[in-house]
Amino acid sequence: MCFLGPFALLTTRAMEPIGPARESGPDLLDSLVTEAVAAATAAGARVDGAAVRARLGGMPATMRSSMLKDAVAGAVLELDAVAGPVLRAAPDGAPVTRGIVAEIAAR
C-alpha cells in the first residue's frame, strides 16, 4: 500500500503516467509516501520509505496505474481500497492523501 497508494493517487490526480506526474508533483509524491509510511507504522508494519521513494522514482515514465486506466475509461474508482487504509490509520489524518482523494472524487 505504501507503493501502490501514492502511485495510483498521483497518476490519477494528474491523469498522466508516472513520469509526467512525478515531474509535476515531486513534493506531492513525497508527501503521499510519507503519509502512507506513517499509516503503516501506526498499524505496526515496518516500511522503508526511502526504498519506496526509490522504486517510485525508478519506474519507467510511461507506467500508468490501474486507477488511472479506470479513470480514463470512466470506470468506478477504488478510492477507498487504495487510500482508505492510509486515511484511517495515519496519525495526522493524512491531509495530502485526503485532499487528493477529494480532488479525484470531485471529478
Image (tube, rainbow, N blue to C red):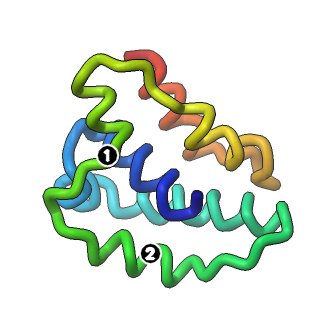
Q: Position of residue 81 (x, y in %)?
A: 60, 37
Q: Quadrant of residue 27?
A: bottom left
Q: Is residue 15 above or below residue 92?
A: above
Q: Quadrant of the N terminus?
A: bottom right
Q: Quadrant of residue 87?
A: top right
Q: Is residue 85 above or below residue 23?
A: above
What's the residue type where badge 1 is placed? Thr
Going by the picture, which residue comes out furthest to the left? 62
Q: Position of residue 5 (x, y in %)?
A: 51, 51
Q: Looking at the image, which residue is at 51% across and 31% down?
A: 78
Characterize the local packing of mark 2: few (<14), some (14-19) or many (20 or more) Cα atoms within 10 angstroms. some
Q: Is residue 57 left or right of residue 42?
A: left
Residue at numbered disc 1: 11
Q: Secondary structure at mark 2?
A: helix
Q: Is residue 62 above or below residue 85?
A: below
Tag on residue 74?
Answer: none
What's the residue type where badge 2 is placed? Arg
Q: Is residue 94 left or right of residue 7?
A: right
Q: Is residue 71 left or right of residue 86?
A: left
Question: Is 25 in front, or is 20?
Answer: 20
